[in-house]
Amino acid sequence: MEDANDTTEINFILVGLFNHTQTHVFLFSVVLMTFLTSLVGNALMILLIHEDPQLHKPMYFLLSQLSLMDMMLVSTIVPKMAANYLMGTKSISPAGCGAQIFLFVTLGGGECFILASMAYDRYVAICHPLRYPILMNQKLCLHMTSGSWILGGVDGLMQAGATLSFPYCHSREINHFFCEAPLLVRLACNDTMLFEFFMYVCCILMLLIPLSLILASYSLILAAVLHMKSTAARKKAFATCSSHLAVVGLFYGAIIFIYMRPKSYRSVAHDKVVSAFYTIFTPVLNPLIYSVRNKEVKGALRKWLEKHFLGRL
């Protein structure tokens, strides 16, 4: 076991999520399997969307970006956590900590805007189907995607840079399993009130603005669906939108719980569990939700399996 006194002078100490009891070893195994399943599931989703011409549509292109972000998100958090647990170490360098904050905020912020773009795509497809090729053209799709990455990256760069600029003259022990800006600034010995206000403003911009766009899009979609005369069309619209709303609810619910609650209501133990949910378990649910509820994805998967595996038997 690494001596914390040797590392606290230069490195931060991550307390972690698990200890070495039998229950926690089992839970760690579950997390590791979930991580691997998430990588495989999201990679397969990207592969199917790239290879199947029927999935060369704006909705699936945006979905492939969501899958890419999910793969990168779990890869940012889980490998370091697993390495520390298996090797019996707890330290992480300031550079490693900054990288985790940058990537985590970039990917989390990017996902917010990708989900908003997906909501707009569904709004155009259902409310303006005849104008869909014009309103949701390839150029706009690329702009929305690149905008999501850039906005997330700018926020991530600012938060990581500002967080690491504070002097940490007391304990460097972070009661978490990865570096997260709100927990890190609590260890700073300078006044961080201005930075915390800045982070709160960033949360409003990166969380509530995309969420408002999503809610507005789905309010208009609901109104349009309720006026549809065809029962089959109503069912198809509800099936497509319910998958997206499930992903939005899981992602936004967990992040708002972490970042938008008052300090007096925060509990480190609860924050760890919720953080584990949206950084480890939500990424594995996204490909499952979209594949199970989507006939086109299931059809693409069946064709891919027949071509690469069943056709060789």
Image (cartoon, rainbow, N blue to C red):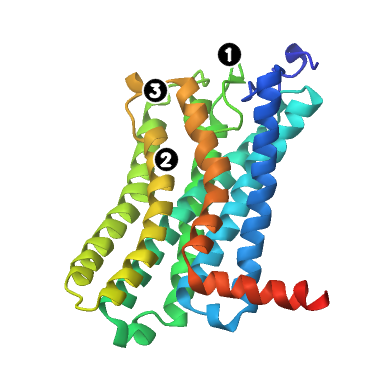
Q: Which of 302 and 159 lies nearest the eye of the viewer?
A: 302
Give residue 215's quadrant in the image: bottom left
Q: Find numbered disc 3 in the image and state the secondary structure of the residue it sits on.
A: loop
Image vertical order of residue 215 relative to residue 49, above or below = above
Q: Pointer 2: what residue?
A: 255
Taking the spot 26% from the left edge, 74% from the top edge, the residue there is 231
Tell me if I can see residue 106 in this picture: no
Taking the spot 31% from the left edge, 83% from the top edge, the residue there is 129
| x, y percent for residue 44 | 65, 63
**Upstream in sequence: badge 1 or badge 3:** 1
**Upstream in sequence: badge 2 or badge 1:** 1
Specify the amino acid type for callout 3: Arg
Taking the spot 46% from the left edge, 63% from the top edge, the residue there is 293
Taking the spot 39% from the left edge, 31% from the top edge, the residue there is 196
Q: Pointer 3: what residue?
A: 266
Specify the amino acid type for callout 2: Ile
Q: Find numbered disc 2 in the image and state the secondary structure of the residue it sits on.
A: helix
| x, y percent for residue 115 | 41, 59
**CA neighbours of label 1 inside 10 A, class few (<14), some (14 to 19), many (20+):** few
For the residues labelled 2 and 1, the Cα–Cα distance comes to 28 Å
Q: Pointer 1: what residue?
A: 170
Q: Find numbered disc 1 in the image and state the secondary structure of the residue it sits on.
A: loop
